[in-house]
Amino acid sequence: MNIHEHQAKAVLKAFGAPVADGVAIFSADEAGAAADKLPGPLWVVKSQIHAGGRGKGKFKELPSDAKGGVRLAFSRDEVIAHAKDMLGNTLVTHQTGPAGKQVNRLYIEDGADIETELYLSLLVNRDTGRVAFVVSTEGGMDIEAVAEETPEKILTINIDPETGVTSGDAGKIADALELKGAAREDMLSLAPILYRAFTEKDMSLLEVNPLIVMKDGHLRVLDAKVSFDGNALFRHDDIRALRDLTEEDEKEIEASKYDLAYVALDGNIGCMVNGAGLAMATMDIIKLYGAEPANFLDVGGGASKEKVTHAFKIITADKNVKGILVNIFGGIMRCDVIAEGVVAAVKEVGLKVPLVVRLEGTNVDLGKKILNESGLDITSADDLDDAAQKIVKAVQG
């Protein structure tokens, strides 16, 4: 689960991280009062969407030369003008795709005197199975670009879970970021704070870009992006309360109600599969034969007839879907349950696009019998290769 920048900063501030004062607003009428709560004379007006690249983004409804989604304001009136300009409009960044995201809230923040911009993040290093700090002196830039062009400028410091962040670890981080004086002392305190926030709140990503050294020599978290492990949210009612459904795909929201692993994609072949690995293989083979998957959907190993029915409804609700591939290998999941769910869903919502079903495993003969005797226009497939070719051919005519 993702949260907004202002929410992330509030979480980090509660752990003791240095962040600027700021006020979140939801209408332009609140902009003036928000500015009055901050000292000025510099304010930063930030669009709050779940995407990076806001500063370089462009608003669909504004002239092409208009400022981006993060703007400086040097007066109260300018704060209000920016708020009126940005709220309710659609911001397009390199992470939103061409559709962009509507800006429904802003964060008015106290300005900072920036001396140096740095990059710092925490994530789980899959190579070591440990939480790691990833740091670079190249802050304020896309870390992907830094990794591609100057990978030697990105350093990783793995943390032993038995000790947490030691003074030695914090020193390595400070050295990697070339910190001196007060900034170095700040890092010796900040590194353990960020690690504790990451582990105690079950984060999957904590990215500070940029982490700044101010002209007074001290560190400040200038931007913060935080994602949480969805499987651990049951432990954190305070974090779940931060969820912004307007930032999520409606189909993904609906899928989460039934514990379905669903991710919307840009293709036109809907997929319903059991098991994440098989789902990835199914999407790969669809691409191999020249088409694009419309989604990743894993119904899980123990799905019920009702769960399968809901999954099918979510797929058919996507207007981009021109064909559906159901690919089930029955282990714990029984093929007859899948067949019953598919038949129930088709009878309830109708079938307006080609449907190919590949079943294998537990009760496969019974599952095929249910489909064959349903009277529905369902194409059976013998294996995954056969299924992919059939659905791609059906969609492409």
Image (cartoon, helix red, strand yellow):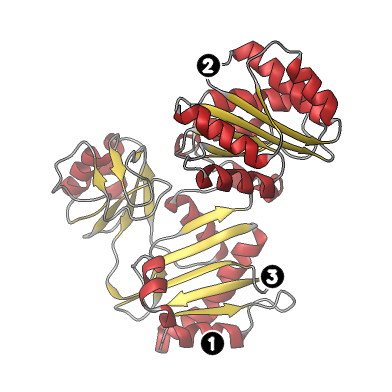
Q: Residue at position x 79%, y 18% from top?
A: 370
Q: For the residues labelled 2 and 1, say whether their Cβ atoms are less than 8 Å apart.
A: no
Q: Which residue is mark 2?
A: 352
Element marked by disc 1: helix
Q: For the residues labelled 3 and 1, say whether their Cβ atoms are less than 8 Å apart.
A: no
Disc 2 versus disc 1: nearer the observer? 2
Q: Is residue 118 visible?
A: no
| Residue 332 as seen in the image, left or right of residue 286 | right
| Residue 280 as seen in the image, left or right of residue 301 | left
Label 3 crowd (10 A; few <14 / some 14-19 / many >=20): few
Amino acid marked by disc 1: Gly
Element marked by disc 3: loop
From what the image shows, is residue 43 above or below residue 154? above
Quadrant housing residue 191: bottom right
Q: Rounded to the nearest whole Å, what is the CA distance between mark 2 and mark 1?
A: 62 Å
Q: Is residue 195 visible?
A: yes
Element marked by disc 2: loop
Q: Which mark sits nearer the N-terminus, 3 or 2? A: 3
Label 2 crowd (10 A; few <14 / some 14-19 / many >=20): few
Amino acid marked by disc 2: Lys
Amino acid marked by disc 3: Gly
Q: Rounded to the nearest whole Å, what is the CA distance between mark 3 and mark 2?
A: 46 Å
Q: Which residue is mark 1?
A: 171
Q: Which mark sits nearer the N-terminus, 2 or 1? A: 1
Q: Residue at position x 67%, y 76% from top?
A: 164
Q: Which mark sits nearer the N-terminus, 3 or 1? A: 3
How far from the left and from the top, in percent, is residue 141?
A: 34, 67
